[in-house]
Image (cartoon, coloured by chain):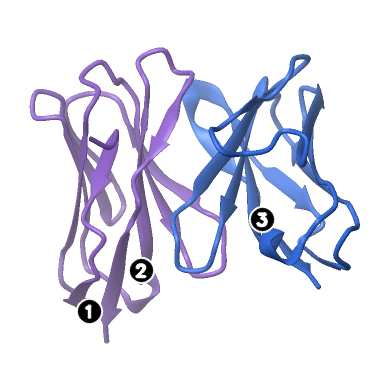
Chain colours: A blue, B purple
Amino acid sequence: GAVVSQHPSWVICKSGTSVKIECRSLDFQATTMFWYRQFPKQSLMLMATSNEGSKATYEQGVEKDKFLINHASLTLSTLTVTSAHPEDSSFYICSARGTADTQYFGPGTRLTVL
Amino acid sequence: QKEVEQNSGPLSVPEGAIASLNCTYSDRGSQSFFWYRQYSGKSPELIMSIYSNGDKEDGRFTAQLNKASQYVSLLIRDSQPSDSATYLCAVNSPSGNQFYFGTGTSLTVIP
């Protein structure tokens, strides 16, 4: 149980394009999902907390207009990187909060912006 | 002061030894504590959760919690090369709305 999927697992795009990443909780409902970014050999960095049916809460320094988050249902949250640039290349990981406040992570999406 | 602190390591232990990973947290009201393992290039996976003072064992893993000292640890018995990874300590805020990760401890098990 407590499986979280992400799609796509990796994506390469041209600078200036937008990329959408989906995060799904497959066997449980998640009112709260989290989006993280991780650069090579660095720690997880929380970008935003996504609550179903309401606006996401962004961490300081994260541009909400650049990283659009939509949590439209109890099993799906999406992150759209708008007008992506090479510095946005990173490993994006979502997690969903399950029972007992446990976070379950998706497998991650590796984004490369050319 | 960071909410969760871990020694970044690297920690190296020989195969078959006990690996001890430590974590301290700042918010005395925290109630939920987690250990995650992250292999290079992969996302974190949950190893154990612990909510009460004392020890909790699951196979070769034992989590230890001491709320008075604000200290959480993870022991890995009979360490295997496949245990080589970064181990992340995570703590919930008292409200449950925030989830704080440590920076992780890199463990290498030497065959």
**Residue B74: image x %, image y %?**
23, 49
In the picture of the structure, the residue carrying the numbered disc 1 is B15
Q: Which residue type does callout 2 highlight?
A: Asp
- Callout 3 touching callout 1 (CB < 8 Å): no
Is residue A99 visible to us here? yes
Amino acid type, label 3: Gly
Q: Quadrant of the C terminus of chain B?
A: bottom left
**Left/right of residue A19 with respect to residue A88 in the rendered view:** right
Kindly identify the amino acid type of the residue bearing the numbered disc 1.
Glu
Among numbered discs 1 and 2, the one appearing first in the sequence: 1
Q: Nearer the viewer, residue A37 or B33?
A: A37
* Crowd around label 1: few <14 · some 14–19 · many ≥20 (10 Å): some
Rendered view: B84 above or below B34: below
Q: Which quarter of the picture shows residue A15?
A: bottom right
Which residue carries the number 2 mark?
A: B83
What secondary structure is marked by label 2? helix
Residue A1 makes an appearance in the image: no
Cα–Cα gap, marks 3 and 1 = 30 Å
x and y percentages locating residue B17 in the rendered image: 15, 71
**Viewer-nearest residue: B3 or B62:** B3
Q: Position of residue B67 (x, y in %)?
A: 15, 25
Same chain for the residues at labels 3 and 1, yes or no?
no
Q: Residue at x 27, y 57 (%)?
A: B60
For disc 3, the marked residue is A108
Subunit ID for the residue under disc 3: A
